[in-house]
Image (cartoon, helix red, strand yellow):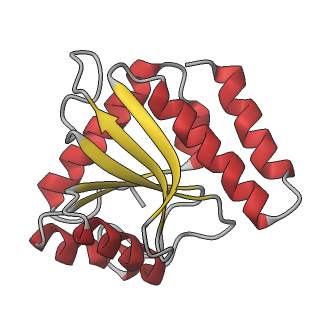
Amino acid sequence: MDRPAILGYLAAAAMAPDSNAKGKAYEALVAYLFSCVSGCIVECGITNVFGTEQIDVAVGNLAAENGLYLLPRVFLVECKEWDQPVDSRTIGYFLNILAGRSIEVGVLVAANGITGDLSNITHAHALGLTAAARGIKLIVITTEEITDLTSVVEFVELLHRRLLRAYATGTVGAPDS
């Protein structure tokens, strides 16, 4: 994992001329991050057969010893390079996509996190309760956390800790609010 590359992807997203280009640059960053992890393969921008749902990044996880061995073999990633926290409606839509595909873990890379408060389980955080009851865990990673990464080991540890938090709290594996 190359720190200048991460900063370059973030700069490309920040300087993009419109929201679509900004989103594509952010998706490219996330695909890069996961492709740096041992045992991970990525596919980007996949649309379902009906043209109604688009997956930003699909990750195949071979569960390598120094990779994402705590995460399932396949998981999906939603990328939101928004100026505001991601709202409940968007989280609910992503969770429904996961449920429809029997995917047990979803990763939301949200520039500014999600709405609500983790300690009070409000707004978007509350959706983690119903997702957990359906066997789905949601992990949230922010741009600030990505910017702070210095190695693949740190990225892997961040994802593993978020998954553990999602299991332990029965809600969303998100940064402390």
Q: Determine the image quadrant of residue 12.
A: top right
* Relative side of 158 to 13, left or right: left
| Visible residue check, residue 163 | yes
Residue at position x 75%, y 56% from top?
A: 22
Which quarter of the image is occupied by the C terminus?
bottom left
Q: Residue furthest front?
A: 49
Q: In this view of the protein, which residue sits in the foreground, 140 or 46? A: 46
Q: Residue at x 30, y 48 (%)?
A: 75
Observer able to see residue 121: no
In the depicted structure, whether residue 152 falls above or below residue 93: above
Q: In the depicted view, which residue is nearer to us: 157 or 58?
A: 58
**How far across and how far down the image is residue 167, in percent?**
14, 54
Is residue 122 positioned above or below 41 on the image?
below
Q: Which residue is drawn at the image coordinates 40% and 24% (left, top)? A: 37
The quadrant where residue 10 appears: top right
| The one of 62 and 88 positioned closer to us in this rendering | 62
Report the residue at 22% width, 50% height from top.
165
* Residue 119, horizontal then vertical, whole percent: 29, 68
Note whether 26 is above or below 84 in the view shown: above
| Drawn side of residue 106 relative to residue 47, left or right | left
User: Residue 150: image x %, image y %?
Assistant: 54, 21
Q: Is residue 116 left or right of residue 159?
A: right
Q: How many marks?
A: 0
Residue 154 as seen in the image, left or right of residue 24: left
* Percent of width and height locating residue 152: 45, 21
Considering the image in quadrants, where does the N terminus appear?
top right
> In the figure, 42 relative to 110: above or below?
above
Q: Quadrant of residue 91?
A: bottom left
